[in-house]
Every structure is written in structure tokens, then in C-alpha cells.
Amino acid sequence: MNSCVLEFYKKAKTANDSGFYDLIFVENSELSYEEVLNLCPSLPRGWFELTKLDKALRIEFARDFCLSTLPYVPKNYPLLSDFFSKMDDIGVVLIKKNQNSLFECELVYSMQSNLSFFRGSPPCSEEMIDLVNRELNECLPKDFLAFLKIHNGFSKNYDSGIIKAECLKEFAQEFQGLIINNSKIIKCGKKQIDPSSLIPFYQSYSKGDFQCFYLDWFSQNDIGNVYYSSGDLAISDFNLNISSIETLAFPSFLEWLIFYIEEVEL
């Protein structure tokens, strides 16, 4: 694991306010699957088996699973492959947040550059994915639903990251209610938009800024997504004839994800 990963968990464990009570790097332990499962019932069997492989095979297996699970889009396939080619390790970390809680688990992606790391929570079950999509009137994009089979919650470095599926409805209700109840007006360019057309799926560093599925933007046979700025009370303008990287308006979840996993300096 690169030094960014080790520093993150070291700080988290020693912090007084939001730290972890205990940590276990599974690949460095001699615990059996049954022993680990007693500590962390949410641990996928495949993740445990991954820790028994050498680094190169861990990365290869994770890459192949990701590429086979997400929808195949020719222009995106090599970009996703490139993400895995820049890794130096993948590992499983068990996290105990307080003395009386069970451990939770994360799959950690460590990058060769020592600039970035990524943390993903265990995937959703098919039943959970169907339930969440029904709760949101079956409007969630297909590529996002596919991603939930890989990770239900995903973040880069110290970011808040992608919101867990079971929290999406509550986030949307609170987000929309805050805007409506405070009589705020959100604009896209000069056009006023309906806040109920926005479903936040990513939160930026625990702030009031979100990447949202925008139900009034149907692009590439699915729902596009835009960046909501709480300071500007505006979403990114997808009508501008400039790149998605400049506008932060993406025609698909997968295109946003590829943008998100690009490495940036801490």
C-alpha cells in the first residue's frame, strides 16, 4: 500500500473525534475466513479470497470483474483498464468505529504514483438494487445500477464520495426539501429548474455540493448528471458546447466515474 493509504488510516485511528477504534489489514493477518466473518459479517467471500493472491493477481482479478460488470462502452474500456494499470496494490481493510461495534470492510485501491487511493464498500445485492431503484421511481441510470454490483459507496482520498444506495432516497428528500422550504431558486444557465428533478449521488467532502442525476436531461439513452453548487445555487450547464470536464455535466454516470478516478495531487 502506498504511503497515502497508510497515513490516512493512521490519522483516522488516532483522531479523537472521527477516528477508528481498530483496524485490520486482512492480507497482513493470518485470520481464517470464518474468523474474519465473525468480526465482519459484511465481508464478501470474494474479497477475502482476493487477499490470498499476490498483488499482480489481485489487481488483475479486480480489473476483470469491474470491466465485466460495467456496461461495455468502447471509448471508456481502455480508460478503465488504464486505471488498474496505475495501481500498486489492492487490499481489504476491516474498520471498527467504536468498542462495541462490529467491523466494517473496505476494498482499498492504492496507486503507484503515491498521489491517490480509493476506498469502496461491499456491493449491493440484486434485491437491494431493485428496491432502491423502485423507491426512486426506476429512474436511476443503468450504468450506476451496474456499479452498485461492484461498490455501494466509493471515494477518493479523503472525499465523502458516492452516496450509499440505501441513503439515496433520504438524501434526495432532504436536498429537495431544503431548497423548496427555503424558497431557493436553482438555475441552469438562465433557466430555473425544478429541484425535484435532481437526485444527488455524490457528495463533495461533506459539503453542500453534489453531483446529481438530472431527470430532465436524457442523454445517450439514459439520465445525465450535473454538478450542483450550493454557493451558486446552480447546476452545471449541459447545453454549453464545451467539454464535460469543464462543465462537470456528464451524459452518463460512467463518464463521470472515469473523470472521478483520474489522479489528482493531494
Image (tube, helix red, strand yellow):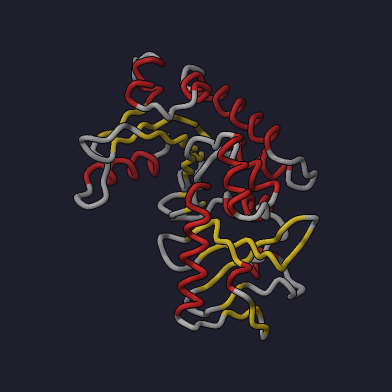
Write the residue at 47% across / 39% down.
Answer: 121
| Image position, residue 215 (x, y; %) | 68, 64
Quadrant in the rendering for residue 42 = top left
Relative placement, left or right, of 111 versus 75 is left
Write the residue at 34% across / 20% down.
Answer: 29
| Image position, residue 73 (x, y; %) | 78, 44
| Image position, residue 262 (x, y; %) | 58, 51
Relative placement, left or right, of 254 versus 158 is right
Q: Is residue 258 above or below residue 217?
A: above
Quadrant in the rendering for residue 251 = bottom right
| Image position, residue 60 (x, y; %) | 61, 27
Write the residue at 60% across / 55% down.
Answer: 136
The C terminus lies in quadrant: bottom left
Relative placement, left or right, of 262 versus 183 is right
Q: Is residue 263 above or below residue 22?
A: below
Write the residue at 49% across / 21% down.
Answer: 45
Nearest the viewer among 210 and 177 is: 177
Nearest the viewer among 126 and 258 is: 126
